[in-house]
Image (tube, grey):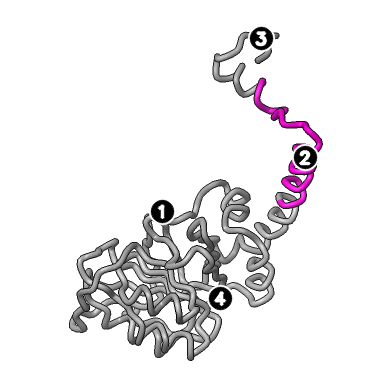
Amino acid sequence: MSTLPDIIRDIERVSPDVVAKARTFQAAILADVAGRRGTMHARVAPVHHGMQLAGPAFTVEVRPGDNLMIHAAIALARPGDVIVVDGKGDQTAALMGTLMLSACKKLGIAGVVVDGAIRDRLELLDLGFPVFSAGFNPAGPTKLVPGRINHPISAGGTVVNPGDLIVADADGVVVIEREKAPAMLALADKKVDDEAARLDAIARGDTASKWLPAALRAAGVLKEGEEL
């Protein structure tokens, strides 16, 4: 019986066309059309609120506080990939810092998402490379423990498969399954149009939510025929 190797080099990625289109949407729009699921825990946040990224997931699993496999992932990832690290949410040691992230930028990697700590916050602000992490810690990592590359992982409480679409901005990180991504983008177009129409209505003074009375009745807050 054959077993998968710890390092899987060849993965099927969400297409560049889908990534380019996804980059035009807020993470919140994509999360809504995906059924309000697939978002990472709010602990995984951008180093700076202006950072945003989109691209296929290049997944890495490490033991807490050890970044050996992240170095291997940087060597293997393609330009445009988003390196997504399952660091178990550990914040006792930084898994990445300026040196590694500068290498990522030079290699054309689209960004990094780490469910774990990083360091060199001020230098990363100057680097201008999108990084999302669960926190910061000045302690450095070890480079001793094997892990896995391009296996399914859990990051920020969300399943991430290699090649899935990752979109992240000031609100956080959303993961869209690779196979579903094209259909989600069509729904996102409609969602944007609907919200634009609603904003126009609000600007004209129509601030009432048409769905609210029915929802309140369904919840038992209002009786049938009763209005707010």
Determine crowd level at label 3: few under 14, some 14-19, many 20+ residues with C-alpha closer than 10 A: few
Q: Residues within 10 Å of mark 1 (few under 14, many from 20)?
A: some
Residue 206 lies in the magenta stretch: yes
The alpha-carbon separation of the residues under discs 3 and 1 comes to: 39 Å
Whether residue 84 appears in magenta in the rendering, the answer is no
The label nearer to you, 3 versus 2, is: 2
Quarter of the image with the N terminus in it: bottom left
Can you give x and y, in whole percent of width and height, for residue 150 in the image? 41, 76
Gap between marks 4 and 3 measured at Cα: 51 Å
Q: Position of residue 163 (x, y in %)?
A: 51, 72
Mark 2 in CB contact with mark 4 (< 8 angstroms): no
Q: Which of marks 1 and 4 is nearer the N terminus?
A: 4
The residue under label 4 is 13
Mark 2 or mark 1: name the one nearer the start of the chain: 1
Query: Which comes before the other along the chain, label 2 or label 4?
Result: 4
Q: What element carries label 2?
A: helix
Kind of residue indicated by mark 3: Glu
Judge the density around disc 2: few (<14), some (14-19), many (≥20) Cα neighbours within 10 Å: few
| Residue 165 vs residue 199, the one in the foreground | 199
**Residue 95 place in picture, x, y as percent:** 29, 75
Q: Please tell me whether mark 4 sits on a helix, a strand or a loop.
A: loop
Q: Which of marks 3 and 1 is in front?
A: 1
Label 3, label 2: how far apart the Cα atoms are: 30 Å
| Picture quadrant where residue 136 is located | bottom left
Instruction: Choose mark 1 or mark 4, whichever is in front.
Output: 1
Circle 1 sits on which residue?
42
Between marks 2 and 1, how big is the CA–CA gap? 31 Å
Residue 218 pos. (x, y %):
59, 19
Stretch of the chain drawn in magenta: 192-213
Tell me the residue that label 2 is attached to: 203
Find disc 3 in the rendering and name its residue: 224
> Is the C-beta separation of discs 3 and 2 under 8 Å?
no
